[in-house]
Image (cartoon, rainbow, N blue to C red):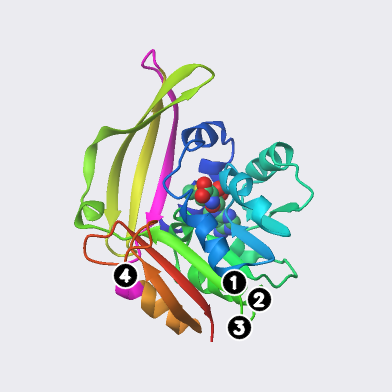
Amino acid sequence: MEDNYNKYIKELYDNPKLYINEFINYEDDIYFWPKIIKMYKPKNVLEIGIGNGRLINLLHGYVEKYDGIDLSHELVDYCRKKYDYDNVSLYNQDLKKCRLNNIYDLIILPFNVMNNFYSENDIYNAFNNLKKMSDKKTIIVIDTINPKIEDLNDREEFVKTNEFNMDDQKVLVLENKKYNNINSTCIYKKRYISSEGTIIKESILPNKIFFHSELQLLIKHYGFEIIDIYGDYNFEKISNQSRKQIFVIRRK
Ligand SMILES: C[S@@+](CC[C@H](N)C(=O)[O-])C[C@H]1O[C@@H](n2cnc3c(N)ncnc32)[C@H](O)[C@@H]1O
C-alpha cells in the first residue's frame, strides 16, 4: 500500500472543491505566520503546498515576492485566478521533483505538508530540493503535528471530525483511521456527507507520523541546524502537551 500513498494524496487534492471549502476558514495559524515574517523580514518567500491559497492572501502583502508551489494543478489554477497579485507567482510543482531556480529568504511548509512525505526517498528528495532553493541565510519553517498516542489508535467506525458550508449546504466530514506501524503512517478515510445524508465523496488521506526526536534527527542528518522549535502557533516552548512541532531551521 505504501507505493500508493502519493497516488492517494494526488487524488485527494485533484478535484479539490471540497478541500478548498473545508479549510477556507482555517484560522489557527493566522497570527503565527505574519509574526514569522516580521521576525525574519524576508524579501522573498516560497510556500510549499499552497492548498486553497489562504496564506497567499494573508502574507503576500508583507513581502516583495511571494512564490508558491503545489502538486495539484487544479489548486494552482484556482489560486492563480483567485489571488492574481503582481508579486505572487504560483507553480504546479512537487517538492520531491522541484525545479525552481531561485534562492529564497524564507521557505515555509505550513499545516502538515511535511506529513505528505512518506518514504525514505520522498523525505530525501524533499530535504534535498529545499537545499537547492536555499543558502545559509535562508530560514525554513516546518509546521507539523506532534503525534499523540491517539494518532496511533485504529478506529473502524466513522466519526464526525468537521463540518463546513459549500454552495449554501452543510457538509459533514466523517473519518475512520488505521495506523501502519511499519511505515508510521496513519491512513484516514474521509467521507463527505451532504445535509440529506448522501455520500458526496470518499477519499483517503495518508498522514506520515514524525515523532519529535525522529524529526530532529532527520533535520540534522540532511545538513540543517535547528534555530527554534515551537509547540504551537503561540510560540510556546515545545513540551509533552504540545499539539504541534514547528521547526525553524537553516542550512549548516
Ligand atoms: C494541508 S494542505 C496545506 C495548504 C496550505 N499551505 C494551508 O496552510 O492551508 C497541503 C497541501 O500541500 C500540497 N502538497 C502535498 N505534497 C506536496 C508536494 N510534495 N509538493 C508540493 N505540494 C504538496 C497538497 O496538494 C495540499 O494542497
Which labelled disc corresponds to residue 212?
A: 4
- Give me the residue at 67% from left, 42% from top: 79
Q: Write the start and end of the magenta stretch as one range.
A: 195-214
**Above or below — where is 231 with respect to 128?**
above
**What distance separates the C-alpha of mark 4 from that of mark 1?**
20 Å
**Above or below — where is 146 with respect to 217?**
above
Is residue 123 visible in the rendered image? The answer is: yes
Mark toward the start of the polypeptide (4 vs 1): 1
What type is the residue that disc 2 sits on? Lys
- Give me the residue at 30% from left, 67% from top: 238
Q: Where does label 3 land, which residue? A: 136
Is residue 4 visible in the rendered image? The answer is: no
What type is the residue that disc 3 sits on? Lys
Query: Is residue 198 on the magenta stretch?
Result: yes
Percent x, y for residue 52? Answer: 58, 41
Q: Nearer the viewer, residue 175 or 242?
A: 242
Q: Where does label 1 land, which residue? A: 130
Q: Secondary structure at mark 2?
A: helix
**What distance separates the C-alpha of mark 1 from that of mark 2?**
5 Å
Q: Answer few, some or many: residues within 10 Å of disc 3's Cα (few below 14, many 20 plus, some between 14 and 19).
A: few
